[in-house]
Image (cartoon, rainbow, N blue to C red):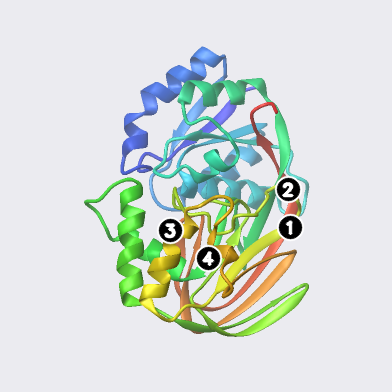
Amino acid sequence: MTARIILNPYANRWGALAQRPEAEAALQAAGVEYDLVVSEYPGHGIALAEEAVHKGYETVIAAGGDSTYNEVVNGMLRAAGDNPLEVRFGILPMGTANDLADNLSIPKDLSAAAQVIARGHTRPLDICQVNDRYFVNNSAVGLETAVSVQQTKMKRTKGIVRYLLATLIVIARNPQWHMRLEWDGGEYDGPVTMVSVGNNPRTGGIFYTVPHANPFDGKLSFVHGSMTRRIDILRILPRIMKPGEGNYVEHPVVHEYHCTWLKIHATPETPLHTDGEVIAEAISDLEYRVHPGRVPMLLPVE
């Protein structure tokens, strides 16, 4: 059956467009029958994915980075509505950080990634939602999203370095919030520097902001913490880059929880991102939830 490939040419600062011949050669070598469409503007991937589901494609592949995967999943789920999603979702990692690919052990080599698609092995993947937007990897409010806003303004710097420099710039500004958090299992009302919500552990290429998130456990995992001094934030920054022992969640002012829903009220308003894409620069009220096993995800055979 023919797969629909949705290519975001802008991913990795137009790097995905340059990789298009390599991606098509990899698909052909793997024996994948496909047709390919190119998104033309932000949000176009949503419409293209929704169209693909309505047209009866059994497999939809997002070719790009994490924000591309986000758009395609949102389009697929919009098309499915309240019905089970039977269309398989796969990725060709062609972005900057490729967090979802690394978190799910999908090879970044395009030939190997095409082989994963060709084998057709799927596993039900949890999908998370904030307000009316779905996400596959992570979302955040507070400092983490302020970093996302900053890095989108940095046109000359590329790759993981851009995320790191953006982080240092935002820490120097030291934005702070007061938030009320409620979830099935607890509540918190007080100062907050950041809240990171993860379906997977890693974001931004190097940051393990929700280190114990698991996209197959049916849970919504989140971390919140408050540090008011820049020097304290800088000191804890290296610990966010540790995937295991020594991660920043071991610090006494940082807390990690696993739940099924989370409500946030922020003062002042906070920016919000999903899978690295800033979807609101100023918002006060958010509701998160998890959809266990919602998407049949094409993955390497375990």
Q: Residue furthest left?
A: 156
Give the Cα separation between the discs numbered 3 and 1.
27 Å
Give the Cα separation between the discs numbered 3 and 2.
34 Å
Mark positioned earlier in the residue sequence (1 or 2): 1
* Picture residue at 47% right of the left edge, 50% below the top: 67
Name the mark on residue 294: 2
Which numbered mark, 3 or 1, is in the foreground of this view? 3
**What residue is shown with label 4?**
140
Residue 159 is situated, as x and y percent measured from the top left of the image, at 33, 45
Name the mark on residue 238: 3
Within 10 Å of disc 2 (Cα), the crowding (few <14, some 14-19, many 20+) is some
Give the Cα separation between the discs numbered 1 and 4.
16 Å
Which numbered mark, 2 or 4, is in the foreground of this view? 4
Within 10 Å of disc 1 (Cα), the crowding (few <14, some 14-19, many 20+) is many
Residue 109 is situated, as x and y percent measured from the top left of the image, at 46, 26
Mark positioned earlier in the residue sequence (4 or 3): 4
**Where, quadrant-wise, is the N terminus in this rendering?**
top right
Q: Residue furthest front?
A: 246
Residue 212 shows up from this direction: yes
**Where, quadrant-wise, is the C terminus in this rendering?**
top right
* Picture residue at 32% right of the left edge, 64% below the top: 168
Within 10 Å of disc 4 (Cα), the crowding (few <14, some 14-19, many 20+) is many
Q: Amino acid at mark 1?
A: Lys
* 3 and 2 marks in contact (CB < 8 Å): no
Mark positioned earlier in the residue sequence (2 or 4): 4
Name the mark on residue 219: 1
Left or right of 156 on screen, residue 25: right
Q: Amino acid at mark 4?
A: Ala
